Structures are given as C-alpha cells and as structure tokens.
Amino acid sequence: MGAVSMNESFDLNQAADTQVLVILRHGPQGGSLLREGLDAALVAAAFGRNVSLVFMGEGVMALCRGQDVDALGQKATAATLEMLQMYDITDVRVEAAAMTSMGLSEDDLILPVLPLPAKALATVIAAAPLVLTF
Amino acid sequence: MRYAILLLGAPYSTQSSHSALRFAKALVSRGHKLETVFFYHDGVHNAARLMTPPQDELHLGDAWQQLHAEHGVALQVCIAAALRRGLLDEKEAARHGKQGVSVAAPFELTGLGQLIDAGLTCDRLVTFGP
C-alpha cells in the first residue's frame, strides 16, 4: 500500500470550530461541481465563516500535483486550491480510502491534508453545523 | 422545523429537481416551514422562464412558482451560475447588453452568501444533487 497514513488520532479540535463543511466528491474534469463547490467554500470564508473541506471519492483527484492549467479550455481549479490559505481555509481533510483507491499518497498532493478513515469522517460530518455536498 | 433546499440538478436531465419538489411539498404538508429553495450549479435551469415541457409532463417552473405563491417559499438563484448558463433577469440583461429575459420573478438572482445564510439560519438544509 502507498504512503497513506491511516491516522486514527485525528484532530477533532479544529473540526469543532467548523461552521461550514464543504464536501467535494467530484474531480476537476468532466463537470463543474468541484469548481462551484469551491466557490461556495470561498464565499462562506469571505463572509467570515470557519470553513473546512473534505475531499471524498473522485474529489481527491482535485488535489493532484502537476495538473495542466486550463488543459480543457476550462478555468482550472488547482489555482483556487492554492489560494485557500488566503481565505483562512486550512482545515483540509481527505477520505483515506479514496486516496488508496486512486493510488495517491500525500506526496502526490498540492496541499497538506489530513487523511481520515471513514469512521472519523462520519464524526467530522456529524459535528458540522452546516454541510454542503458537491 | 425551518428548512432550506439546495438544488444542483438540471430539470428533466436528472431526477433531482422532481425529488426536491416532492420533498418540498411533503415538508409543507407536514406543517414545516420551507424558507427557501436555492438553485445552484445546473439547478439554475429550473428558473428558465421559457421552459416548455410537453403538456403531459409536470411543468417544474410552474410548480416552483406555485410553491412560492402558496407557501411563500423564496426561489433564490445563484447569479454567477445563472449568468454563465444564459439565465438573466431584466436587470442583468440590460447590464450585459443582452436582448431578452430568461429569468423572471418570483425567481430572484442572488449571491452564494444567501445560501450560506439559509444553511446556517434554518434547522435543516437538504441538498439534491445530480
């Protein structure tokens, strides 16, 4: 198996402050749900809300290094992800099983992330006052 | 309870619009308050003024308007997602120099901030996606 650390002792403190949890389940190609989901996250952050992101399933592909900018004539999402810190969005979690199934390790990703096992993910989702799923 | 609905699917393409509408009707019939339906992503096509399905099919646009008329449900459409997809009200059409109007009241073009507000002030926000 790759270098995905199945970190059981995840940090719930940060999740406890989360006001808006945005779940991203779609990759950067094939549709605009990822882009529009990220837009919602940025707007929530710009309105002063504590925003956390969770990348699930195919959504983890959004975090891959080495994506060609605008390869498909669409606005790329990787640049937006690199801007997250400017919006104070630092709590970025990924579904560990999705990274494994996509053959990704943390070294392949453009952001520092916290891979979570399914059980921990459920806790994070249950604790968030508002969950937006894209 | 106070509810909000987030609808992401295009009408007549996926089931999500029909499901959202049925859920909305179930809510009000059980005495809950549905504050707003927020149309985002391909869901903005639900606000298309010229939507003309065959007569033997449910007219989703009319159904949303009926929900607004009978239960005061706000019909909010993300302006950024709408403009991209050619859905403009009179004001936006004039601003962008476009002829014709594809969105009319009671649908209102508004910002994503309204979605966040609705989500945080209502007891439940339920998403219907493609």
Image (cartoon, rainbow, N blue to C red):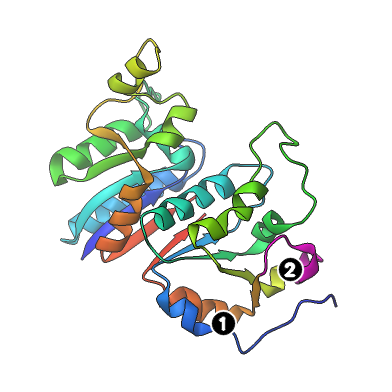
Q: Chain of mark 2?
A: A
Residue B87 versus residue B120 in the image, above or below: above
> Which residue position holds label 1?
A120
Q: Amino acid at mark 2?
A: Met
Our reading of the magenta stretch's main secondary structure is loop
Image position, residue B44 (x, y; %):
41, 36
What residue is at 30 percent from the left and 64 percent from the top?
Answer: B124
Q: To which quarter of the image does residue B69 belong?
A: top left
- Label placed on residue B102: none
User: Where does the magenta region start and end?
Assistant: A100-112
The three-letter code of the residue at mark 1 reads Ala
Q: Tag 1, which secondary structure?
A: helix
> How far is mark 2 from mark 1, CA to CA?
15 Å
Looking at the rendered structure, whether the residues under marks 2 and 1 are on a common chain is answered as yes
User: Quick one: A47 or B38, which is closer to the camera?
Assistant: A47
Q: Earlier in the sequence, mark 2 or mark 1?
A: 2
- Which of the 4 image quarters holds residue B93? top left
- Say if residue B126 shows up in the picture: yes
> Which residue is labeled 2 in the image?
A99
Using the rendered image of the protein, determine whether residue B11 is visible from the camera's viewpoint. Answer: no
Horizontally, residue A35 falls left or right of residue B2, namely: right
